[in-house]
Amino acid sequence: MNAHADHPLAEDLIHVLDHTRDLWDGLRDATIFITGATGFFGNWLLESFLWANDTLSLNAKVVALSRNPETFRKRAPRLTSHPALLLHRGDQIDFDFPVGHFDAVVHAAVEYGSPLQTFERNLSGTRRVLEFSARAGVRRILFTSSGSVYGPQPVNLEFLPEDYPGSPDLADAKNAYGLSKRASEHLGHLQAQEHGMAFTVARGFAFLGPHLALDQGSAIGNFIGDALAGRPIQVNGDGTPLRSYLYGADLAIWLWTILLRGTPGCVYNVGGSEAFSIAQIALMVRDILAPGAEVRTPFNTEPTHHPSRYLPDVTRAREDLGLETWIPLEEAIRRTGRWAILPTPDRIGR
């Protein structure tokens, strides 16, 4: 998988390398372990790692945890055939530890199920990954958490900073995912202090780009799916909630930078810096991908209340690590749409 122009993500991967080139010496001759490799975060990490590995002759390797390597190989033959990628069969909660020394770990696996399953499996998976990291001599760990650890965003707070003291309601079962991430963060900090590992946290918000599922609940993913299928673009609710989005290539830049340059013990919000209403996003998708398509909103979109917000304050990432939103939302939508219609088997998340 050399840096050839015929790679379907060549433009994006060149962009990632342009903004991370001075980081990669930290992984020269290294071996890293990634969980959640078949998800949105994991795919961007694998794509960008392998591109950098080839372009810069890093002689590095990545071991990716997968519950079903055969399925992953069928869905992503170009990616999984790369000689620097080894698929390790297992579930995050009880996988057999790969043999040997590892230099870095990215724990990006996510579990969903009943509230009890979601909480227990996410926390158990983090515990297992941390145990492996301690045994394998890992120096740096990146844990991908979520903005859901903050609980509801107050109406008088425009963006959520990392030191916001809010928390999801402990008694509400709907908060199992956010609370599992919150507990996992704490466990990670404790284990890192115990074993002398550099542990950093990336609290993710909302994203788009290649590998995004277009039919699994993401508002912007659903809009793009509707537009490309020739359906009316369906907005659920009144369209007033505010969101910001970070494109997958920028996400990869942020994650590698936080892993390799983030301050140990530090938490970084990861997401876009510009707020849009859900209704604005639907219209933007329509104008870019399906001009003239109908946008359906079942309720009045004139605000009669304070709109809900899910918006990160990314000042820390910008000031400490020089991270930005380089690819604006309009271009991100255009690139995501272009990827979604490519006739290729490497269509994970479609």
Image (cartoon, helix red, strand yellow):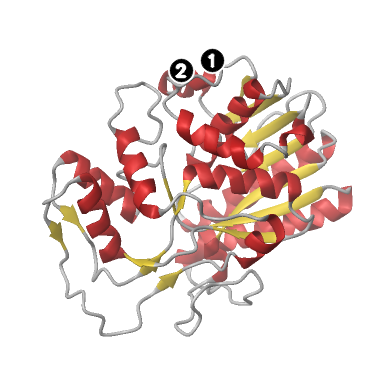
How many numbered markers are drawn? 2
Q: Read off the residue under disc 1.
A: 81
Could one spot residue 184 in this view of the protein?
yes
**On residue 161, which mark appears?**
none
On the rendered structure, is 2 left or right of 129?
A: left
Residue located at (73% from left, 23% from top): 58
Q: Amino acid under label 2? A: Pro
Residue located at (42% from left, 37% from top): 211
Based on the displayed image, in which of its 4 quarters is residue 235 positioned? bottom left
Q: Give coordinates of residue 179: x percent, y percent.
A: 58, 63
Label 2 sits on a secondary structure element that is helix
Q: Do the residues labelled 2 and 1 touch (CB within 8 Å)?
A: yes
Q: Give coordinates of residue 330: x percent, y percent.
A: 34, 52
**On residue 77, which mark appears?**
2
Q: Give coordinates of residue 295: x percent, y percent.
A: 15, 58
Could one spot residue 127 in this view of the protein?
no
